[in-house]
Image (cartoon, grey):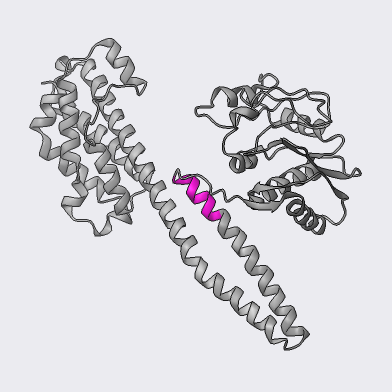
Amino acid sequence: MRIAEFILQDMEGILREWEAFASTQLPAAAQMTPLALRDHAKQILGAVAKDLATPQTRQAQAEKSRGRAQEPLGAPETAAEIHAVLRARSGFDINQLVAEYRALRASVLRRWMDVIPPADRRLEDVVRFSEAIDQAIAESISFFIARVDQARSLLLGMLGHDMRSPLNTMLATAAYLTALKAGDKVSDAAARLTRSGRAMSVLLEDLVDFNRIMLGLGINVTRAEVDLGAVLADEVDQLRGAHPGREISLEVEGDATGRWDGHRLQQLTRNLVVNAIKYGAPETPVRVALTCRDAEVGHRGRQPGSHRRRRAARQDLRPAGAGPGGGARRKRRGRTRPGPVHRARDRPGPCRRRAGALPGRRHRVHGAAAATAAVAAQRVPPALRGRACVCAGCAGGSKGLDG
């Protein structure tokens, strides 16, 4: 008797063993009914038996083993996929989900070998059965992870939304205490409360950004007419307070007024300066320069010696046998959608460069925070592609932004 025929004939006995094993997966299974414990096990076994009874070429077998099995367009969810979703709702973890399939494989093979003489057992059946179970596991894991990630993202979204009300209440109370002018002690306490509330607000915005990324919605970019020089001056002033032992200077040349996302560009500047402090020579100052011209804006952070420290750090982290620059090449090969292209290359010069563009004006970014610039920039205007870098340290040596 072939395994496909045996599964259909001994279905009830196999399901009883499935149910018995599922009931041991605590604590999720503690309050589940026998029907819920069996869930879609019968449909999964039916799909396995149907797959075993279907002729399969060697090429189809090889494609299936690599996860490239052909699926018809518009096909409904499989029993394994639905089973994964229901197990996630019931509180099973991924180890318990996979354990069910492991027990099912062992149960079917043991029961089949108990009734089939050794001379009638076919190795091909065992191989095909294991492939079918592996396919069901792959389908279940994919849907299980997607379901858990979706639930986590929704939870974070609700948490971020619900935190806004108490946070706004705290800030309003702090403003009220400040307006009372009830003495230095009360004013100082209100000021601390305001600073803490603003810090919590920043963390909350980061949480919202992370959640939007996880849901595939991207990060909000809000552009407004601002003076970019004033925006960066405020950020640099805060960085000086956070790093009192380091000299941080800001140079602004020209008119930096335009439509910018000031918050994102402050994040960019913060990352540039913090990386310069972390990887640069401790005794040298950090200089942030903003150069504004008619058609372009250049923004760079520079510290002598920082590129050598970063190169040494990358050498320490590089896998054995990896050539120089392999990570950057892999990232460029893995780009799958249009948008700003960020080049990163090591060269004898003042900095390790990453290039991005801001809408409406050319904005060259030098340092380790080009991802933030990409968020603020969105896409590179066609008119700006192919222009040379305006950074004096790089002497116009970069290629265009279009890769």
Q: Looking at the image, which residue sits at the far front?
A: 294
Q: Determine the residue positioned at 77% across, 33% down.
A: 310
Q: Looking at the image, which residue sits at the far bottom?
A: 182
Q: Is residue 69 left or right of residue 319?
A: left
**Main SS, magenta residues:** helix
Q: Is residue 108 above or below residue 166?
A: above
Query: Which residue is nearer to you in this view: 53 or 284?
Result: 284
Q: Is residue 70 above or below residue 15?
A: above
In magenta segment, residue 64: no
The N terminus - image quarter: top left
Query: Residue 297, image x and y in percent?
Result: 74, 38
Query: Which residue is nearer to you in this view: 339 or 141?
Result: 339
Q: Determine the residue positioned at 18% across, 34% down.
A: 45
Whether residue 356 is visible, yes or no, is yes
In magenta segment, residue 213: yes
Q: Is residue 326 above or below residue 354?
A: above
Quarter where residue 253 is shown: top right
Q: Determine the residue positioned at 13% across, 39% down.
A: 13
Q: Is residue 296 left or right of residue 53?
A: right
Quarter where residue 133 is shown: top left
Q: Determine the residue positioned at 21% across, 42% down.
A: 18
Query: Which residue is nearer to you in this view: 171 or 70?
Result: 171
Quarter where residue 371 is shown: top right
Q: Looking at the image, which residue sits at the far right?
A: 283
Range of magenta residues: 207-215
Q: Is residue 195 left or right of residue 16?
A: right
Query: Residue 70, image x and y in percent?
Result: 28, 21
Q: Looking at the image, which residue sits at the far left?
A: 9
Query: Residue 390, image x and y in percent?
Result: 78, 31
The C terminus - image quarter: top right
